[in-house]
Structures are given as structure tokens and as C-alpha cells.
Image (spheres, coloured by chain):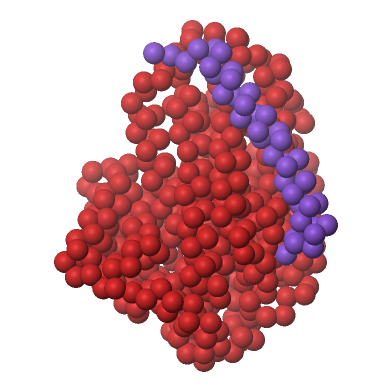
Amino acid sequence: MTISTTALSIIVVIATLVATLTPILLIALFIRDWKKGRLW
Amino acid sequence: MTGLDDPILPTSIAWGLLAAFSVLWVVLGWWLGRRNKTAEDHMLAGRNVGLALATATAMATWVTANTTMTAPQLALQLGVWGMLGYSLGALGLILFAPLARRIRELMPRGFTSGDFIRLRFGTFTWRVFLVVSLIYAFGWLVSMAMAGGVLINALAGIDYRVGMTVILTVCVIYTLLGGLRAVIGTDFIQTIIIIAGAAFIAWLTIDKVGFEAIHFNLMEERPELLSLLFPAAIMFLFNNLLFGVGEIFHSNVWWSRAFAFGRNVGFRAYLFGGLLWLSIPIVAGFIALATPALGINVPAADMVGPLVAAEVLGLTGAIVVFIVVFAALASSLDSLLAATSDLVTRDIYRGHIRPRASEQHQFRATKVIVVLLGLLTWLAASYRGEIPIVGSLAELLYFTGAFVASAIWPIVAGLYWKQANPQGAAWSMILGSGIGLASYFLIGFYVAALVGAAVSLAVMVLATWLAPRPFDWDRLAREDTHAMGSPA
């Protein structure tokens, strides 16, 4: 039983999308915390 | 070590990158730590770390050199399950989320995991825990320093001992200057670098090679890597899961963050960090599956990631990999140095040597201890292979598996089980580690963590069932608030 091309591509594309969006999300959270004075 | 004849990055460029990032981390560490006035500032960054920095530091610390280099290796050796199994390491972070909230609620003024064990289970169990925890922490520190030397050598041809010395020295300096604040601040930038770099390489691999070609070539040359019924890979999945949970539950690296994160931040930070971390081993591991399609000959499995990056991107790929690896190494080494020095300062120096040490004494002691830890780590990593048990990264990690796994149940029982027996907690760690180690030598490396956890669970449950010892949870907060600067 092997994984299909479609299933492999779905898993990898979702993971890569999450990884691509993570830095953006972290920077957005950083700016929000900074504006509210909640960084530290 | 890697078997590569030619490094993928010119040595001169590697030295330039090492110098630039070393200066950046040290200056940032000094700047972030310039307002640290007390041991509490230095060890716990003021106890009010916000969600952005908290999430990033949880992710960065859990992304080690293993994640960036071993995930591709595992994908190459174990296929799809290799990268998916590695990503389940995220469960350790996710499962620690409720524990972090509980720890913060029970001990709002706590400092270390040792503080909790001492107050919850008493002196004997505390000492057993310190032995287990410090053996593991030191093993991890040495393994990270070794990884630094090996990877810098493999990527850029810089001598193992020189590369290891540079990365260890840089981490010691900025941890010394800025404490946990420096560690968390640099972790934020390191997380962005690591994840953006890994995603960049993955997108280019998808674009230049494509899933059809990757799948077709794997089916032709290595069809087992696409198999969903690969027994060795499925065993690895469970082993990695258990090891990851044990590492996070007991280690002061994660406890010190639970104490340092602001109120109501710890749960969300560990949960978000874990969920976001899930993708990293898949992204880093996937590129290894492109080797048959790219026609790359892989002389050493642990170098497959850099080789694919260099093939797809040329010099740019080699530079991105070098920066990502340096960031991953630094983000784990600094956390370990800070958390282990806190544990030694609070639980060994103050707990056993100078019980009446003032806050200023402890502030100074923690800095001296960071330097001493750095020196000890350097000595052990310098003589790798010459110390019988410090043979390779994998051997060292599997060796510590028994210790790590034997601490899972005493921690969980201590936090949630009112009747948990203190002596049972100590003996579950002693017998779990002992029998786990015996199984490491008598059966094989792959069972040490499993046996350690099973024995530990059995002893903990049996001891509490035979002799329950009710505990007043409020004692933790009551005694803990008077802990600093007073006798243990």
C-alpha cells in the first residue's frame, strides 16, 4: 500500500503553506504584543 | 564524519556568515539583558513574556539540529512515515500546554522543575530527580555542541573542534549577558530564519522537481519510501513520540518557560507552538524524497538536506542551509545553557551548598555556572569518541532515553494526582532509569525509553495504590512564595 501522488502533494503543500505563514503570524503577533505593551 | 569529500559552502563565506551572526546574537543578547538586575530577571525574563515571543521560543527550542538535518535523513531512510513520525514530536509541546498552565497556577513564584519536585515529593525524590535531569541536560548539551562541530565541518569544511568552539562560545556569551531574555529574544529571530529558510527550499524543490517526478522516481528506485505499511517506520513513530514527551515534561528548559510566560500565555504558547511545529519536519524532510528525481548520490544520509538544497539552489541553497542550521543549533544550545544553569544555581548551589544565598549571590552564581557548563560541554564534545558512552549523537540521545522516559509519570502524577506517593516517585525514576539502561545494553537502543517509561508507570501506580499520600496543593504556592533568598 503506497501513498498516491495526490496525497503526498496535499500533505507537503499544506505543511509548506503552514511553514510559510508561520513567520508572518509570529511577526503579526509580535506587533500586536508590542503595541499593547505585552512583549515582556 | 559525513563522508562528504567537498563541503557544499566555501569556507570563506562560512566564516563570514559565522562572524556576522555571532556578532548579531551577542549584541542582541547584551541589549536585551542590559536591564536585568535580579536573579529573577536573569532566569525568568521578568515572568511576563507575551504570546509572540513565548510561541516562538517554544518552537525554536524544539527545532534542533536534529530537526533540520535528521528529518531529511529519516525521510530518506523511512520514507513518508519518517517525516510524519518526526513531526509527531510536536505532541510533546501540545501535551505540555495544559501542564504549563497547571505549573503556573500551582507555583506562581516557582523557578525550576527542581523546586516543584522538592516541594511536592520531598528531599529524597528531589535529589533523584536532579541526577536524572542533569544527566539528561548535560547529554543534550554535549550532543548539540557535537552537532554544531559536525555540521559546520560537513557544510563548510571548518575543523570540527573549531566550529564547535565558535558556536558554543557565542551561545555562552549571549546567554551570560542576557539570561533568558536574550535566549527568548534571539529565539524569535532564529524561529523566523529557520522556518522561512526551510519553506523557501521546499517551495523551490516543488517548483523545480515537481510531485509527479518525485513520486515516479521513488516508485522506480525506492518504492518502500512511499509505503504506508513500513514496520520500522511505524516503530520509530511511537519511539519518537515517547521520547519527545519525556524530554519536554521533565526538562527545566520547558519548566523555566512555563514560569517565565505571562499569566494565561503558557497554554496558548505551547499549543500554538506545537501545532505550528508539526509542519517543520515535513517541510524539511520532504526535500530528501527528491533525491532519486534529482539523481543525487547521497554519501551520508544525514547530509541529504544540504545536498538537495545545494543541487536545487546552488550557492544560495548552501548559504540558506548554513544559516538555518546555525540558527537551529544556537536556539537549542542557548536554551539548554540557561535552563541548566538555573537548575544548578537554584537546586545545587542554593539548595545544597549555600541555602542562605541572597538574590545577588544567585545572580552572580548563575553567570559563573553558565561559563562552567560551557567549559564542561566543550571538554566532553572535544573528546567525542574517546569517552565510551559519548560515541555519536544518536547513541548519546538513545542512552539518555531511559532517564527521560522514567521522569514522565512522576511529573504527571505530581501535578495531577493528589494521592501520589513521594517515595514511589523516587523509585519510579530509579527503577525506570536502571531497568531502561539495562535494556539499552541487553536488548537494544530502541527499547530504553519504552522500558524506562513502562517500569516507571508501574512503580508509580503500585506505590500510590499500596500507600496513598494525600497532598495539599496550596502548599506549593505558600512555600514557594517564601523560597527566594531563604533556606531551602
- Quadrant containing the N terminus of chain A in the rendered view: top left
**Residue visible at 61% across and 14% down in the picture:** B211
Q: Position of residue B422 (x, y in %)?
A: 29, 72
Q: Position of residue B303 (x, y in %)?
A: 57, 33
Left or right of residue B274: residue B35:
right
A38 in relation to B70, above or below? below
Chain depicted in purple? A
Q: Position of residue B83 (x, y in %)?
A: 50, 30
B450 in relation to B412, above or below? above
B49 in relation to B10, above or below? below
Total marks in image: 0
Q: Is residue B258 visible?
A: yes
**Residue visible at 66% across and 15% down in the picture:** B209
**Residue visible at 64% across and 82% down in the picture:** B364
Chain B drawn colour? red
In the current view of this chain or complex, which residue is farthest to the right?
A35
B372, B281: nearer the viewer: B281
Displayed quadrant of residue B471: bottom left
Q: Position of residue B259 (x, y in %)?
A: 57, 67
- Quadrant containing the C terminus of chain A in the rendered view: bottom right
Left or right of residue B256: residue B155:
right
**Residue visible at 72% across and 23% down in the picture:** B204
